Amino acid sequence: MDANQETVANPFGMDEDCRQCPALCETRTQVVHGYGDVSADFLVLGEAPGPGADATGIPFTGDEDGRTVLSVLADLGFVDAFDSDEPTVENVFLTGLTRCHTPDRPPSDDEVRNCEGFLTAEVRMINPEVILPVGQRPLEALAYEYTTKRAEDFDVTTDHATTIRGRGFELVPMMAPEEQTDDQRTALLEHLASLLDRDYRQTKGRRNR
């Protein structure tokens, strides 16, 4: 699978008519695959597309909850306009555990499993240095797949704004921004800024891009 360097929307050409979850085909507007810089050092992982992303086709856009995530990235210089439905991004890739909006409920375990291949392919192709799981479920999914600890050993509130060593990259858990206090948001920004200030690429060594 090769990346299309000319586009930031679904740059790996993943199936935009996926029908692995038949019930969601009736309720979704579109499949929402990853968006961003294919050579990014940072990957941000949400749980599922919100109603805004279902309309725009771009993770974390189109509604207030998504924009609060983008506002953090804007403060770090990764996003030019957090309130845009098609933001310009640099050094970050936005994606989710699942690719279809599930109205009025979180995605089921089966739906998450059906989308595992999409996420695994994105992580392998991008090979990020740092992954930011937004919320408990993305944190548990990454912990199960990419750390030596049990998923239940992690808590996004306790682990918020800390670094967890994964297999080949670092995890920086992030509480949903709308749930963060001002102090928790400041702690996250300071922690991520510290990663940008040091040679965080020591996790794997600098790659040829």
Image (spheres, helix red, strand yellow):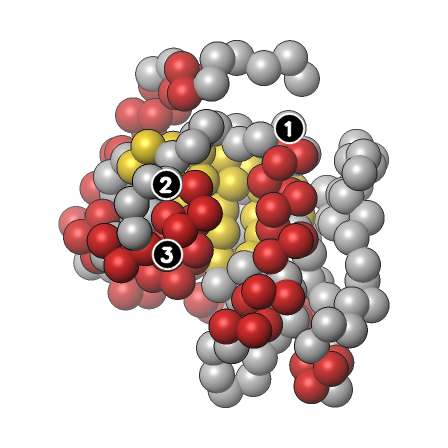
Q: Residue at x 39, y 62 (%)?
A: 137
150 on left or right of 206: left
Which of label 1 and label 3 is nearer to you?
3
Q: Position of residue 104 (x, y in %)?
A: 50, 87
Gap in angstroms between the C-alphas marked 2 and 3: 10 Å
The residue nearer to you, when weighing 107 against 200, is: 107
The tag on residue 186 is: none
| Rendering quarter of residue 17 | bottom right
Which of label 2 and label 3 is nearer to you?
2
Gap in angstroms between the C-alphas marked 2 and 1: 23 Å
Q: Position of residue 46 (x, y in %)?
A: 48, 58
Three-letter amino acid code at the position of disc 3: Glu
Residue topped by disc 1: 39
Mark 1, Cα crowd under 10 Å, few <14 / some 14-19 / many 20+, is: some
Residue topped by disc 3: 140
Residue topped by disc 2: 147
Three-letter amino acid code at the position of disc 1: Ser
Dot placed on the residue nearer the N-terminal end, 1 or 3: 1
| Rendering quarter of residue 116 | bottom right
The quadrant the C terminus occupies is top right
Gap in angstroms between the C-alphas marked 1 and 3: 25 Å
Q: Residue at x 73, y 72 (%)?
A: 20
